[in-house]
Amino acid sequence: MSGPELDQLFHALADPTRRAILSRLSHAPASVSALAEPLGVTLTAISQHLRVLETSGLAATQKLGRVRTCRIAEPGFTALEGWIASHRAQWERRLDALGDVLEEDD
Amino acid sequence: MSGPELDQLFHALADPTRRAILSRLSHAPASVSALAEPLGVTLTAISQHLRVLETSGLAATQKLGRVRTCRIAEPGFTALEGWIASHRAQWERRLDALGDVLEEDD
DNA sequence: ATGATACTGAAGTCATCGCTTCATTAATGG
DNA sequence: CCATTAATGAAGCGATGACTTCAGTATCAT
């Protein structure tokens, strides 16, 4: 889970169209055309988004004939949860420590 | 947890300098100067990063005198974990379904 | 008051992003 | 074989991103 990989991962998730694609794929696999149809963008745009999702490990695709079938992939989500898990402990300790200080507020 | 908020959140996390800031702050609060020192960038750059982190709910700052003290904030991380939690079930169901199909691979 | 310290605002630069159009390749169906 | 369909490559465009420098504003110490 190196730095550039995390850059790619979070960057991939930062775009609403890509998150919509992921949401769609988490329901069922789909072709590029099927993904494009409800999103109001070009096939080309979807292809580009898919490349981003693929290199960040969030989606995987497979071309059979002229149809590319896209689905959710594991490595991206594993990396995401791994990063959060590796920081959660410190966050919670820090946020608890803040709670002690913030008793004058609110 | 609306769309634009998620955009901001993931965008904030996509930058290595900002993640370094968060990592530092998850250890202890720090001033802007203290954050800048080990990162090899300008004070101005840190100020700009802090604005991003603050609007995405990942950090909070407070200026006393001429020193701005920065610390981890809760809403950002809550939103992050909330988003993941709301998708994990479908992902896992999907990835399990893939496992059944991927017996020809690897 | 004076000078140093801690930061912020404005403006500019260079790279990257998301998207489009146009052209092309490749597979499929009549 | 020919037309349609599915997708990709190339190139360009407007917008945004990360960063810098330079100039300013407060605050603090002496």
Image (cartoon, coloured by chain):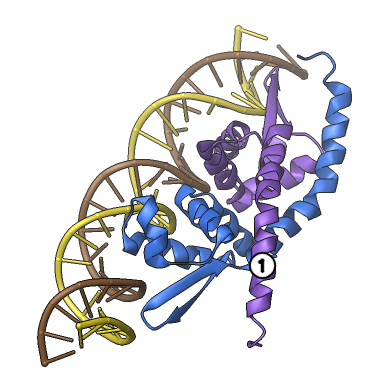
Chain colours: A purple, B blue, C brown, D yellow
Q: Which residue is mark 1?
A: A95
**In the rendered image, the vertical position of residue B42 relative to residue B69, given as above or below:** above
The answer to whether A30 appears left or right of A44 in the picture is right
Residues B105 and B64: in front is B64
Q: Position of residue B60 (x, y in %)?
A: 54, 71
Q: Quadrant of the N terminus of chain B?
A: bottom right
Q: Position of residue A29 (x, y in %)?
A: 78, 34
Please state which amino acid type lies under the numbered disc 1: Leu
The answer to whether any part of residue B86 appears in the image is yes
The answer to whether any part of residue A72 appears in the image is no
Q: Position of residue A32 (x, y in %)?
A: 67, 34
* Mark 1 Cα-neighbour bin, 10 Å: few <14, some 14–19, many ≥20: some
Residue lying at 53% horizontally and 49% vertically, measured from the top left: B14
Q: Position of residue A25 (x, y in %)?
A: 76, 40
The answer to whether A10 appears left or right of C2 in the picture is right
Residues B22 and B93: in front is B22
**In the rendered image, the vertical position of residue B52 relative to residue D6, given as above or below:** below
Helix, strand or loop status at disc 1:
helix
**In the rendered image, the vertical position of residue D29 relative to residue A77, given as above or below:** below
Quadrant of the rendered image containing residue A33: top right
Residues B27 and A82: in front is B27
Residue lying at 70% horizontally and 54% vertically, measured from the top left: A89
The answer to whether B54 appears left or right of A91 in the picture is left
**In the rendered image, the vertical position of residue B52 relative to residue A66, given as above or below:** below
Q: Quadrant of the C terminus of chain B?
A: top right
Q: Number of numbered discs present? A: 1
Residue lying at 82% horizontally and 13% vertically, measured from the top left: B104
Residues A33 and B78: in front is B78
The answer to whether D26 appears left or right of C11 in the picture is right
The subunit letter for the residue under badge 1 reads A
Residue lying at 64% horizontally and 81% vertically, measured from the top left: A102
